[in-house]
Amino acid sequence: MVTLKQIAEELGISVTTVSKALKGYKDVSKKTKKLVKETASMLNYKPNSFAVNLRTKESKTIGLIIPEIVHHFFSSVIKGIIEQAEKKGYLVIILQSNESYELEKKQIDLLLSKRVDGILISLANGTGDYKHLTEIIEQETPIVMFDKIAKVVQCSKVIIDDRKAAYQATKHLIDVGCKRIAHFRGPLLPQNSIDRFLGYKQALTDHNLPYDSSLVYLLDDMSFEEGAFFANQLLIDHKDVDGIFINTDLVAIGAISEFNKKGIKIPEEINIIGFSNWFMASVISPSLTTVNQPGFEMGKKAFKILYKEIKDKKKNKTISHKEIVLDTELVIRESTN
Amino acid sequence: MVTLKQIAEELGISVTTVSKALKGYKDVSKKTKKLVKETASMLNYKPNSFAVNLRTKESKTIGLIIPEIVHHFFSSVIKGIIEQAEKKGYLVIILQSNESYELEKKQIDLLLSKRVDGILISLANGTGDYKHLTEIIEQETPIVMFDKIAKVVQCSKVIIDDRKAAYQATKHLIDVGCKRIAHFRGPLLPQNSIDRFLGYKQALTDHNLPYDSSLVYLLDDMSFEEGAFFANQLLIDHKDVDGIFINTDLVAIGAISEFNKKGIKIPEEINIIGFSNWFMASVISPSLTTVNQPGFEMGKKAFKILYKEIKDKKKNKTISHKEIVLDTELVIRESTN
DNA sequence: CGGTAAATCGAAAACGTTTTCGATTTGTTT
DNA sequence: AAACAAATCGAAAACGTTTTCGATTTACCG
């Protein structure tokens, strides 16, 4: 590996001048500048990033912690982040928390000790306290949270309005004539589940439909199988239900599959609306009406904000935290009338 | 940020001793060892990884280049790599080539200049020459290729036996009684497409079925839409076809969707088998018979091999390249008789 | 107590870069 | 030719760690 020193010796000049020549300092003559650049590329010189990092105290690398990689929404987010980061010359280290609070803590420690320039995170479902997050902020490492956030933590956030989106989804069911609407809700912890539930409830009361807590089923692992299970349960408990708003597409697809198997006609006998707009939603039969969640844009936006905070920190500007709310969109397909 | 120096001053000893105490050298007394460790954790000392990298000439970081992140198979691979890497104390920088040769080249340059300890790569469809790859090998940076590989490049590889798997898939169609079997093949460049095509052809001739090149349709972007398009084309061109082996599940699902729309019964009128076993394959109707491609295991294995090569390089051992072939498995579902 | 061995410590160099600041050279003007 | 300004260069420190090797201290034994 060729170093500045070697180039300097080759040309009989000092390391300083070589460095400055390569970085375009104005106090080195055009002649030597040209000379240095030529021999540098001839020797295939590449700056030792370890040394640069040490000297400049930055690594041009950010960390990303995500609950699950094999997941349509999250992989879209990752793609958005990586693309945007690459444009700005940043690399992305990805870690997966597996929805575990303990892992999430360890991984944050890892990233901090690697001294990444910033951190992007979507919280695990299991995270209840936020000490590990406030620690990041105290260390003054820029951080922005997206999708699954902790409202109480003081940092920038990129989210969708889950409550509003859920409201619109439920309202859509009402608009197509549903009178008795069930909800398969997500676990108690992530804010999203709560907000979606609240949106559902609000839509009911705003349209003079009674809220019946026995129509709300609590999901645990949000799997395909759970969707099928609760669809079946619903047939036993409440034969009069004519619409379901389901917390996420995967579960909705499980439900559809079960209804298909049981010969229940969708949407004639029951309307179904999901959430997230996984690719899968468009290819099953009947195709699934759902709420589009802009993962790619969320990733892009999250990085952009993080980037600004990193730059501001370098300039010793005070960083003001932003909270961006991205638009969702109802995607109407065959599973609703 | 607290440094060794600060700990040393705090205790009135030398930086050397502090460093050695923390690293468990035997030439420092148990008393001072304990003292140093206590104050280190009290001050929340974390070694500056930039300095460590510079000194030890390694970053405990590897690079991963993948054609596409939002993709069930590849995201499974990523998951396998990250999990395994984390176990060994390595972090993973992910880049996406978007199936572009040019991007792939740039990204390899990026990773090399970041001085990652090793590189994992699955080639873009567009990569024809391998100069950028041999460059890595000349630099003596360990590299292992997986799934989409270049046979001619001298490095370790983790793959499946595409040809054998395709053979089995085609044979399955023959076993269920198909006499006239079409193939939607992938583009001309990645070796996988070629091998799958060859397996298909071999199976036909081994079972006394004539090979008819007009039954082979060349896919371009391997999308859902292409599947639908060629399914329709097939109905126009060859009404007598009773089975299709399709290069990848996504395209197969597009075809199924088109056949469903046209009222063609699957598998009664036409048998369909895909490749990869995307999650989606199990939830569409009819569910798709396919070949399971073990993404997660491939990721794990690829990292393990890379890890060994990194270690061997450190010990100046000569590294011997391995070629691992993982088992695939026929997953029989409703789309074949 | 003298002598040797073992235990314990620290000075210093090295990794490769960036940047400050002073020194030297060149050019320009009287 | 003197005087000054501008252009060009390089020495040296710094970033924080690791590790070699010599120095010092302690322990031990006759």
Image (spheres, coloured by chain):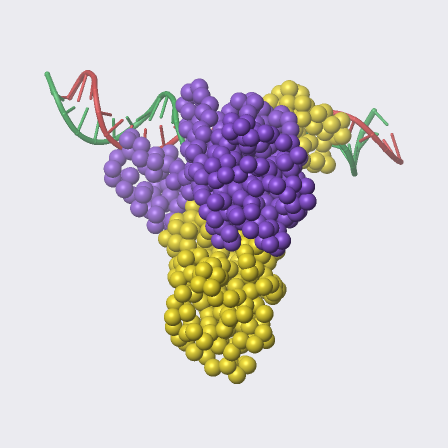
Chain colours: A purple, B yellow, C green, D red
Q: Is residue A311 above or below residue A22?
A: above
Where is the C terminus of chain B found, in terms of image quarters? Answer: bottom right
- What residue occupies the far bottom of the structure in this picture? B208
Residue visible at 42% across and 25% down in the picture: A312
**In the rendered picture of this protein, how many numbered marks are placed on residues?**
0
Q: Is residue B157 above or below residue A253?
A: below
Residue visible at 53% across and 38% down in the picture: A178
Percent across and percent down for residue B293 are 57, 60
Q: Is residue A331 visible?
A: yes
Where is the N terminus of chain B found, in terms of image quarters? Answer: top right
Percent across and percent down for residue A274 are 53, 42
Q: Of B131 and A134, which appears nearest the observer?
A: A134
Q: Is residue A314 visible?
A: no
Relative to residue C9, is residue A143 drawn left or right?
left
Q: Quadrant of residue B170?
A: bottom right
Relative to residue A263, is residue B204 drawn left or right?
left
Percent across and percent down for residue B272 are 52, 67
Residue visible at 76% across and 30% down in the picture: B30
Percent across and percent down for residue A232 are 66, 47
Q: Of B114 and B65, which appears nearest the observer?
A: B65
Q: Of A37 and A334, which appears nearest the observer?
A: A334
Q: Of B255 and B144, which appears nearest the observer?
A: B255
Residue visible at 57% across and 42% down in the picture: A242
